[in-house]
Amino acid sequence: MKYHPIDRNLFIKNRKDLMVQMKPNSLAVFNSNDIYPVSADSTLPFEQHRDIFYLSGVDQEESVLMLFPDAPEAKHREVLFLRETNEHIAIWEGEKLTKARALEVSGIKTVFWLQDMEKVFKELMSYAETVYVNTNEHYRANVATETREDRFTKWWKTQFPAHQVAKSNPILQRLRSVKDPIEIDLIQTACDITEKGFRRILGFVKPGVWEFEIEAEYMHEFLRNRSKKFAYTPIVASGNNANVLHYIENNQQCKEGDLLLMDVGAEYANYSSDMTRTIPVSGRFTDRQRAVYNAVNRVKDEATNMLVPGAMWKEYHVEVGKLMTSELLGLGLIDKADVQNENPDWPAYKKYFMHGTSHHIGLDTHDYGLLHEPIQANMVFTVEPGIYIPEEGFGIRLEDDVVVQESGEPFNLMRNIPIEAEEIEELMNQ
């Protein structure tokens, strides 16, 4: 791994927090992700399933975690299964976790090789009454592929049809949405790497550069600071490309007078950052561009201050909509008649700001969090309003990542990333 070792006390605590909420005589199982084939002998880079990583710190394929708080023998209350490593694997694929190293990483004392899993599982199932399966119930999930988790669930249900079934996801949605200080530090590191990338491109962007060249500058800076990749597919959108919300081709040339919208973020230790900045390709905003830019920035600042403990997700977005409506009126993009005659299900401001303002962020860019429950301290959110004006040839979005505080305004993890129009211009013209 490129990242520095993580304090295993984080994973020990996470397991305890989960197990205390499990039913009596229940067993929970968490599988790693598959390595997905491309074609021939090619595969996609491995990405660990975030839940098993959250609970163990194990960042390796073919790993399985079993938690059984009421197991008759203490050694079976936390069990980790790993693919057996040997000298041949070390030469061809690189070093894998040994049992001793797995203990150092996870704090789990009982580690078996994967070939023993069926035997051990059968023994534990003779004591367990309920099995927690790890389903994907994120509100944005759209999974077409059968996962390793799916195959395991099918297998054990066939072998042990009399056991009861429970879901681990609702517990994890709550646990993972509230961040430990160690996690906040890891997200801060991801944000700091993103800052380095952004400052690098401020001196690089000028008329004539290509969007993919800018993407490459970010990737260079991310890799040299221990990030393995972008946290998500980057958006580098010049001119009217910014009005395509998920523009990812990044294959156009930046032209004089264009604005450049960049929605990029580094990952670090599997934790995501998510930043959007919009800058003038020529180094100076026009008066109209500046007016729209400052309007978006004001909405971002005011929306940030609304993220407080007890706030409700749905009501928060209604209030942000009111802020945006006021700014759009001031810019002349909508008028009072538009507001008076608006459809409550699609308010007038949605013509120019059609997406949500915030989402949870953490191990996933769109992280776990139950949207019908009140916001809590130590949740981490993006704040990302935008105004998109195809008829004027530009779109502007600004985005920071913030930590909800017990009292006072949220703590901005991207506080050091330039955002004010004047500072952007100054840095681009040094």
Image: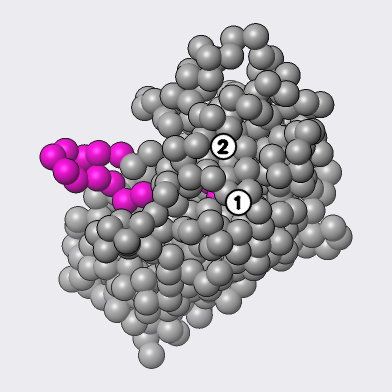
* Image: 396 above or below 430: above
Which label belongs to residue 30? 2
| Cα separation between marks 1 and 2 | 10 Å
Q: Residue visible at 59% across and 24% down? A: 122
Disc 1 residue type (three-letter): Ser
The quarter in which the N terminus is drawn is bottom left
Tell me if I can see residue 277 in this picture: no
Position of residue 178 measured from the top left corner of the image (x, y, whole percent): 72, 50
Q: Residues within 10 Å of mark 2 (few under 14, many from 20)?
A: many
Badge 1: few (under 14), some or many (20 or more) residues near its Cα, within 10 Å? many
Q: Confirm whether the magenta stretch covers residue 112.
A: no
Name the residue type under label 2. Phe
What is the magenta range? 36-54
Question: Going 81% across and 26% down the picture, which residue do you hit?
Answer: 24
Displayed quadrant of residue 253: bottom left
Q: Is residue 224 above or below residue 135?
A: below
Horizontal side of 33 relative to 411 (left or right) equals left
Q: Could you tell which of marks 1 and 2 lies nearer the N-terminus?
A: 2
Q: Which mark is residue 228?
A: none
User: Is the residue under label 2 in contact with that under label 1 (CB below 8 Å)?
Assistant: yes
Q: Is residue 116 left or right of residue 403?
A: left
Identify the residue at image location x=71%, y=35%: 68
Question: Residue 378, relative to residue 389: is it above or below?
Answer: below
Furthest-top residue in this view: 162
Which element type, helix, strand or loop, lies under badge 1? helix
Is residue 253 visible in the rendered image? The answer is yes
